[in-house]
Image (spheres, helix red, strand yellow):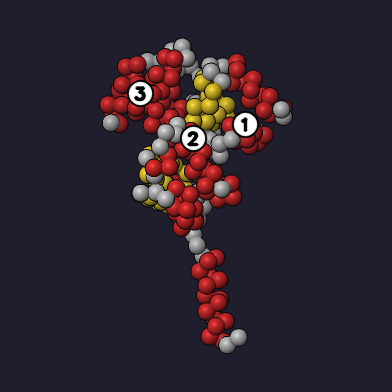
Amino acid sequence: MSDTATQIQEQITANDVVLYMKGTKEMPQCGFSSRVAGVLNYMGVEFADVNVLADDAVRQGIKDFSDWPTVPQLYVKGEFVGGCDIITEMTMSGELDTLFETNGVTYDKDAAEKIREANG
Amino acid sequence: MTKDKREGGNLIGVSAKKMNVTQEIRTRLEAAFAPSHLDVVDDSESHRGHGGYREGGESHFNVAIRARAFEGQSRIMRHRAVHSALGKDLVGRIHALSLDIDV
């Protein structure tokens, strides 16, 4: 494994929820990253954010690691969940709630319902 | 070769070169999945001034595709199938690709 792949593997092992994104959760630098970080923030999910714009090796490395061409990318318990489209669909369908419950990730169910009501 | 034929040949060359990204996406997805429904929208203008925007568009695309080929596949598998059908070269040229995939 390359150094970058090792680094990514360590990040997704050490943290239950990791979002690879452009910018930070406080200051996203891209609309798609902003949307996913916004959902997680709103649902009160504790997650580690990795700003790919701060490190060119990670920016390319995460694409290779996941075999996925775009950012953001969400990992839960070391498993790749998807990018912005998939997370949006899973939020609306309730699959994201189920995923968090299955993996013992704490989240605010009422907040998730509010997102669905506001966007349904 | 007569002059007329040469011009004809040139015209074909020009039109092939000018196949834009929207058409390329459409052609590759039709070939791979024989979709019952396919929308390819160049949404670049709505991202003007944001990251990845470039003059002339062709940077942000919204694709909605419906095909039986996706039956029984997970969300990730469907997205991977579309990425693969488009190819690394084309995906690499697009800044953002929003996919709505279903059977």
| Disc 3, SS | loop
**In the image: residue A9, left or right of residue A24:** right
Measuring from the top left, give residue A100's x and y in whole percent.
Answer: 44, 17
Name the residue that disc number 2 marks. B77
The residue drawn where x is 53% and y is 35% is A71
Residue A77 is situated, as x and y percent measured from the top left of the image, at 53, 18
Label 2 and label 3: CA atoms lie apart by 19 Å
Mark 3: amino acid = Gly
Disc 2 is placed on an element classified as helix
Q: Are marks 2 and 1 on the same chain?
A: no
- Location of the N terminus of chain A by quadrant is top right
Task: Locate residue A61, reporting x and y percent.
Answer: 64, 33
Q: Do the residues labelled 2 and 3 touch (CB within 8 Å)?
A: no
Q: Quote the CA–CA distance across marks 1 and 3.
A: 27 Å
Q: Is residue A33 visible?
A: no
Q: Residues within 10 Å of mark 2 (few under 14, many from 20)?
A: few
Residue A65: numbered disc? 1
Single out the mark in the foreground, 2 or 1.
Answer: 2
- The local crowd at label 3, few if under 14, some if 14 to 19, many if 20 or more residues have their Cα within 10 Å, is some
Chain ID for label 2? Answer: B
Instruction: Tell me where residue A45 sits by quadrant.
Output: top left
Viewer can see residue A108: yes
Q: Which residue is drawn at 63% across and 25% down?
A: A8
Which of the two residues, A46 or B85, is positioned nearer the viewer here?
B85
| Disc 1 residue crowd, few under 14, some 14–19, many 20+, Cα 10 Å | some
**Residue beneath label 3, please?**
A94
Q: Which chain carries label 3?
A: A
